[in-house]
Image (tube, helix red, strand yellow):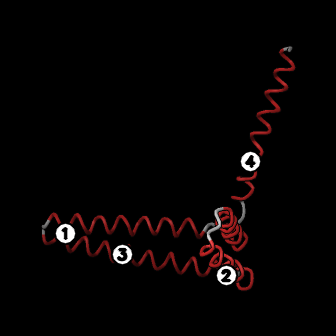
Amino acid sequence: MTFTTLTKNTAMALALMALPTASVFAQSTLTGCAAKKDEIQQQLDYAKKYNNSGQIAGLEKALKEVNANCTDASLRAEREADVREKEQKVTEREQELTEAKATGRSDKIQKKQEKLDDAKEELADAKAELNK
C-alpha cells in the first residue's frame, strides 16, 4: 500500500465519520416550530425504539398539537413571556436575598442565594430557548 493510497483511505474514513456530525449541525440550524417538531420527533423515535408506550402516546399527541397549532410568532411570544416571568422571579429572589442579608443569618442567606442561583439558571435556559 502506498502513501497516497493510505492518505486517500484516511481522508475517506474521516469524511465518512463527519457525516453524522454534519447531520447534527444541520438539525441544530432548525428554529421555531420546525425545531420544536424535530425535538419531539427525536424523542418519539427514541420512545418507539425502547417500546415506551406511555411516552409514545404523549409525544404523538404533542406532535399533533405542534403540527396543528404552532406558529413561529406564537412560539416566540410564548418564549418571550417565559423570559419575562423568569426575569421577575430573579428580581424577587434578589429582593429575598437582600432581606435575608439584613437579618444576618447565614443559613437564610445561603438558602436565598441558592434560590437566586437557580432562578438565574432558569432565566438563562429560557433565554436560550428564545433563540431556538
The N terminus appears in which quarter of the rendering? top right
Task: Label 4, secondary structure: give it.
Answer: helix
Q: Which of the two discs, 4 and 2, labels the residue nearer the N terminus?
A: 4
Q: Which of the two discs, 2 and 1, labels the residue nearer the N terminus?
A: 2
Task: Label 1, secondary structure: give it.
Answer: helix
Residue 28 in the image: above or below residue 37:
above
**Rendering coords of residue 128 (x, y %):** 56, 65
Asked which quadrant contains residue 71, the reply is: bottom right
Is 82 situated left or right of 117 in this image? right
Residue 108's label in the rendered image is: 1
Tag 2: amino acid? Lys
Q: What residue is at 69 percent from the left and 80 percent from the top?
A: 66
In space, the residues marked 3 and 2 are separated at their CA atoms by 36 Å
Closer to us: 122 or 14: 14
In space, the residues marked 2 and 1 are separated at their CA atoms by 43 Å
- Contact between marks 3 and 2 (CB within 8 A): the answer is no
- Mark 2 lies on residue: 61
Q: Residue furthest bottom?
A: 69
- Mark 3 lies on residue: 91
In space, the residues marked 4 and 2 are separated at their CA atoms by 29 Å
Task: Label 2, secondary structure: give it.
Answer: helix
Q: Which of the two discs, 4 and 1, labels the residue nearer the N terminus?
A: 4
Q: Which of the two discs, 4 and 3, labels the residue nearer the N terminus?
A: 4
- Mark 4 lies on residue: 20
Closer to us: 52 or 83: 52
Q: Residues within 10 Å of mark 2 (few under 14, many from 20)?
A: few
